[in-house]
């Protein structure tokens, strides 16, 4: 009796330690999926998916890897300028990961274009592009797995921080060399040097207060309009509603802005400044009374009109702000 019991226990242990056919099939399928993803990544940092590939490699189990997917519409007939800009930053991020020393099969970068996978958009009830979603290795995507594009912008560095938050994979963004900045600086220095050489016998313009005042004013207008925020966050120029086709140049939130918005604010601030200068000149210049009256009226008109517009933009972004001037 003891020997029979011992044999039964031995067989049970052996059977328990031996993987079942289902487990073997699951492991084989997972290995094939990972190998397929690695093969595609070796050819292109961003894997292009259609409906069939999405269902097979992303939705269907098993899966032990995370996938960052950009849902976009890059075809010219879609007229999505933001999609193209976001794609450029996304490619930089994916290539930084693909060619880094820390590259593993823990995470992959993919793309679903609307014209190649419209069924995927319908499956996810998605009606806007571009959209970035993280599909984690385990479970379904949560709310935080959808990237807040309107708030954080689509700069590769911002996307890398979001990827690190969601996957614990830290990517050092490496951008291709851009010689436009150094070239423009070199041209500017060459222009200044040439101007100084041509006028080497008359350098009084370097001591002209108006020249320095105008230069300082331009610098202040550029910095106060939000250009530095654009440089850090990389927001889109504007937003086009995919349903109505309406283009928005002013972001509706106080936590974000569009590039076009900074240009509008810069022009409005410049107009208010010009109005103040005209008022100052009308009060202090030696021109005849008629011209000074015209300058005064023009200055008041510029200040009142453009300050009212600036205040209306502020009210539109900071909901609940109680004050307005001329324009509601």
Image (tube, rainbow, N blue to C red):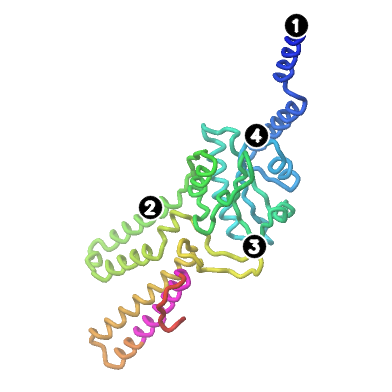
> Residue 34 at x, y = what percent?
67, 33
Vertical comparison of 17 with 178: above or below? above
Judging by the rendered image, the residue that carries numbered circle 2 is 186
Q: Foreground mark, 4 or 2? A: 4
- Whether residue 217 is visible to the viewer of this picture, yes or no, is yes
Disc 2 packing (10 Å; few <14; some 14–19; many ≥20): few
Foreground residue among 189 and 108: 108
Instruction: State the residue in front, 278 or 167.
Output: 167
The furthest residue to the front:
1
Which of the two discs, 4 and 3, labels the residue nearer the N terminus? 4
Q: CA distance from mark 4 to mark 3?
A: 32 Å
Q: How many marks?
A: 4
Q: Kindly indicate whether the residue at mark 2 contacts the one at mark 4 (C-beta within 8 angstroms).
A: no
- Residue at image location 70% in from the left, 43% down from the top: 59
Q: Is residue 3 above or below residue 163?
A: above
Say what secondary structure mark 2 lies in.
helix
16, 248: nearer the viewer: 16
Q: Position of residue 213 (x, y in %)?
A: 27, 69
Which dot marks residue 3?
1
* Extreme residue toward the bottom, this view: 290
Q: How far is disc 1 from disc 4 in space, using C-alphas?
A: 52 Å
- Of mark 1 and mark 2, the one earlier in the sequence is 1
Local packing at callout 1 (Cα closer than 10 Å; few below 14, some 14-19, many 20+) is few
Q: Is residue 302 magenta?
A: yes
Task: Look at 46% across and 61% down and name the residue there.
Answer: 255
Q: Report the mark closest to the observer, 4 or 3.
A: 4
Of labels 1 and 3, the one closer to you? 1
Residue topped by disc 3: 79
Q: Is residue 136 left or right of residue 33?
A: left
- Circle 4 residue: 38
């Amino acid at each position: 009796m003891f020997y029979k019991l011992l044999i039964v226990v031995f067989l049970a242990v052996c059977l328990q330690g031996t993987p079942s056919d289902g487990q073997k099939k699951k492991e084989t399928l997972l290995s094939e999926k990972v190998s397929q993803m690695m093969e595609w990544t070796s050819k292109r940092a961003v894997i292009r998916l259609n409906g069939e590939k999405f269902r097979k490699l992303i939705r269907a189990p098993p899966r032990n890897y995370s996938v960052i997917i950009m849902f976009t519409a890059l075809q010219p007939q879609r007229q999505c300028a933001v999609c193209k800009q976001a794609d450029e930053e996304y490619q930089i991020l994916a290539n930084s990961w693909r060619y880094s020393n820390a590259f593993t099969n823990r995470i992959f970068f993919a793309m679903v274009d609307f014209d190649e996978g419209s069924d995927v958009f319908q499956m996810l009830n998605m009606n806007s592009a571009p959209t970035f979603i993280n599909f984690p290795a385990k479970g379904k995507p949560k709310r935080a797995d959808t990237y807040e594009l309107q708030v954080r912008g689509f700069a590769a560095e911002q996307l890398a921080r979001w990827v690190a938050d969601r996957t614990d994979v830290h990517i050092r963004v490496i951008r291709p060399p851009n010689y436009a900045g150094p070239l423009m600086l070199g041209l500017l220095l060459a222009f200044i040097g040439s101007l100084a050489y041509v006028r080497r016998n008359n350098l009084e313009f370097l001591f002209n207060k108006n020249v320095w005042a105008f230069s300082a004013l331009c610098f202040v207008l550029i910095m106060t309009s939000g250009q530095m925020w654009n440089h850090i966050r990389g927001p889109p120029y504007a937003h086009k509603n995919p349903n109505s086709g309406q283009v928005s140049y002013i972001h509706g939130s106080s936590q974000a802005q569009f590039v076009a918005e900074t240009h509008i604010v810069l022009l409005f601030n410049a107009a208010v400044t010009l109005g103040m200068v005209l008022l100052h000149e009308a009060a202090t210049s030696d021109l005849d009374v008629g011209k000074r009256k015209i300058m005064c009226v023009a200055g008041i008109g510029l200040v009142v009109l453009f300050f009212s517009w600036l205040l209306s933009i502020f009210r539109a972004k900071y909901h609940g702000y109680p004050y307005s001037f001329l324009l509601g």
